[in-house]
Each structure stands twice: as C-alpha cells, then as structure tokens.
C-alpha cells in the first residue's frame, strides 16, 4: 500500500466498523423512522454481540488514520498527496465525520431508551 493511501484505508476501515457497530441498535431505529419496516429488522440484533469488537476496530482504525492525517506537512514529501492542502482538508473533514459515526455507535445504546 502506498504511503498516501494508508490514511485513507484506515479512515475507510474506521467508517465501516462504526457503521457495523451501530447496526444492531441504531439501524432499526433509522429504518423505522424512514418508514421501512418488516420482521427482518429484528435480525439486525444478531450483530449485537460483535458490537464491542466493531467499536474496538473502529477506534484502532481512527487512531491510525489520525496519525496519518494530522501529521505535520514537513514530514510529507513534495509529491505525496498529504502535501496538497485540498486533500489534507478533505481528509480532515471526512475524519471528523467518521469520528462522529464512531461516537454515535458508542453512545447510542445509552440514549436508545429515550427514543422508545
């Protein structure tokens, strides 16, 4: 994997893990709110035992992405993507969006009783 792709890969892995971590709890609520219903929604609870594993993977991936995205520009080589300001800014915006997903995955089960 190229040096410039490591931050993107870790960020994508963190996003996927955050979505999987919230599937058991947040997923059914979002689907019902959107008007999508059915008995199959109860099958999403099968993923609940893996929630802590998904959160751990998301946190490790976010840490690795943070190390790659928020490093000083002086460390980047001039021809790397991390030296381009627009790329750095977009990676930072995506990073904070994924961080929000991870926080929702961690905190939502505690807020869930307020919605039902």
Image (cartoon, grey):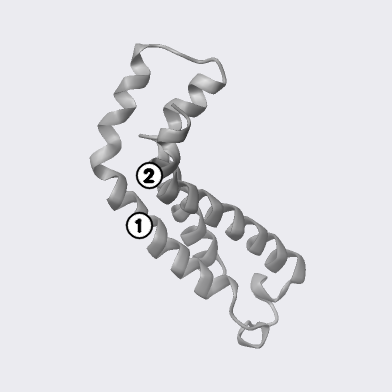
| Badge 2: residue crowd in 10 Å (few <14, some 14–19, many ≥20) | many
In the rendered image, the vertical position of residue 19 relative to residue 79, given as above or below: above
Residue 21 numbered mark, or none: 2
**Alpha carbon separation for disc pair 1 and 2:** 9 Å
> Quarter of the image holding residue 50?
top left
In the rendered image, the vertical position of residue 43 relative to residue 2, given as above or below: above
In the rendered image, the vertical position of residue 17 relative to residue 74, given as above or below: above
The residue closer to the viewer here, 5 or 50, is 50
Q: How many marks?
A: 2
> Quarter of the image holding residue 64?
bottom left
Residue at point 47%, 27% (across, down): 29
Residue at point 30%, 23% (across, down): 43
| Badge 1: residue crowd in 10 Å (few <14, some 14–19, many ≥20) | many
Residue 113 image position (x, y, % from top left): 40, 34
Residue 103 numbered mark, or none: none
Helix, strand or loop for disc 2: helix
Helix, strand or loop for disc 1: helix
Query: Position of 11 compared to 25: left or right?
Result: right
Residue 57 numbered mark, or none: 1
Q: Quadrant of the C terminus?
A: top left
Residue 3 image position (x, y, % from top left): 52, 72
Query: Position of 116 compared to 84: left or right?
Result: left
Q: Residue furthest right?
A: 86
The residue closer to the viewer here, 68 or 98, is 98
The residue closer to the viewer here, 52 or 83, is 52
The residue closer to the viewer here, 71 or 21, is 21
Residue 66 image position (x, y, % from top left): 52, 70
Query: Position of 116 compared to 57: left or right?
Result: right
| Pair 1/2: label in front | 2
> Quarter of the image holding residue 58?
bottom left
């Amino acid at each position: 994997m190229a040096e410039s792709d490591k931050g993107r890969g870790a960020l994508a892995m963190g996003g996927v893990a955050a979505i999987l971590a919230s599937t058991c709890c947040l997923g059914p609520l979002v689907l019902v709110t959107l008007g999508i219903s059915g008995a199959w929604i109860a099958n999403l609870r099968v993923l609940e035992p893996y929630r802590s594993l998904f959160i751990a993977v998301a946190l490790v991936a976010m840490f690795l992405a943070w190390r790659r995205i928020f490093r000083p520009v002086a460390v980047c080589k001039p021809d790397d993507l991390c030296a381009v300001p627009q790329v750095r800014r977009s990676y930072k915006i995506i990073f904070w969006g994924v961080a929000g997903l991870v926080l929702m995955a961690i905190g939502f089960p505690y807020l869930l009783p307020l919605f039902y």
